[in-house]
Amino acid sequence: MNKHILIEKLKTLGFKEYESKVLIALLKGIPMSASEVAKEADIIRNSVYDILKNFVEKGYCNEIETDTILNYQVIDPEVIMDKIERDHTKSYKENISSIKNTFGELTSIFKDNVSNAAKPTTNVQLIRGFNKHRFAKYVDCFKEARIEVLGMFRVSGTYSDELNEDTLALIKKGGKVKSLYQAGTLDFKIVKNGQTTQGTHQDLIKILEKFSKQGEDIRISKIKIPTMAIFDKKKVFLSMTGDKNIPKHQQADVIINNEDFAQHMCDLFNFYWQNSMTIKEFKQS
């Protein structure tokens, strides 16, 4: 292999240029003096001593003492590879541990500040950005609910036949979850036998039947409905998605903290609910 290419590869592993040259020189495999290593590596001799001392300490080469001079002999490169791999693994674990500890402290500070902060003076929040961030805000609203969550959803995305933990937790505490699903146009996927496939009406029925058995009150709408959730008749989460001409990072959701508005949205929910079908009626249709 071209020596310059090998040097560049070693540099990506953390070796400096002179260190790379010394290691390649030692690959002759025979005991060599510092002067011989410097000549083979084509670097000045004064630069070699510290590198060889460092290599000995790391276990990359052996230091052989003779009557007149110290010689150096590289150990098996596979052993060096194992040492470097273990060092990288140790460093990675230490970095991850440091990240978790640091952000654990940051999270604690953030939660303390949030709990002690005065309630926002505005009753409308606009959340822009990627879907994961906006969904996280929806989850926060759900976790704060204590009595009832009314939701209207278009059937899209990926579904499983298990209710999420937050829904089950609210139901177990005696809360009510009523959901209205739009089934006019199916655009969802389902996980079957470890694989994601396009969902069908039959898949939707099976999923919703399982949701119903787990405690969710469900109806199905064949007419178009907004994507919205109402929490404890006090807070409304409106998803403004749906326009495919708007890039995902520019889409937005709105959270409205207003009991009068929430009651109006409850009335709207009840209108759609009364004009929808039960799962049984949907199966028959």
Image (spheres, rainbow, N blue to C red):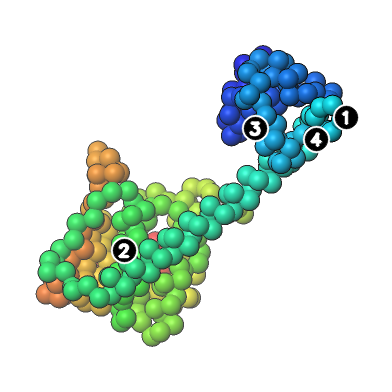
User: Disc 4 and disc 3: Cα gap in Å?
Assistant: 14 Å
Marks 2 and 3: which is nearer the front?
A: 3
For label 2, the residue is 138
- Identity, as a three-letter code, of the amino acid under mark 1: Asp
Number of other residues with Cα within 10 Å of mark 4, as a class: few under 14, some 14 to 19, many 20 or more: some
Number of other residues with Cα within 10 Å of mark 3, as a class: few under 14, some 14 to 19, many 20 or more: few
Number of other residues with Cα within 10 Å of mark 2, as a class: few under 14, some 14 to 19, many 20 or more: some
Near-viewer residue (50 or 27): 50
Indicate left or right for 61 with 230 as reference.
right
Label 1 or label 3, whichever comes before in sequence order:
3
Near-viewer residue (16 or 120): 16
Residue at point 70%, 26% (across, down): 23
- As drawn, the label of residue 62 is 4
Could you say whether the residue bearing mark 2 is in a helix, strand or loop?
A: helix
- Seen from this angle, which residue lies furthest front? 68
Number of other residues with Cα within 10 Å of mark 1, as a class: few under 14, some 14 to 19, many 20 or more: few
Residue at point 28%, 49% (across, down): 129
Marks 4 and 3: which is nearer the front?
A: 3
For label 3, the residue is 50
Marks 1 and 3: which is nearer the front?
A: 1
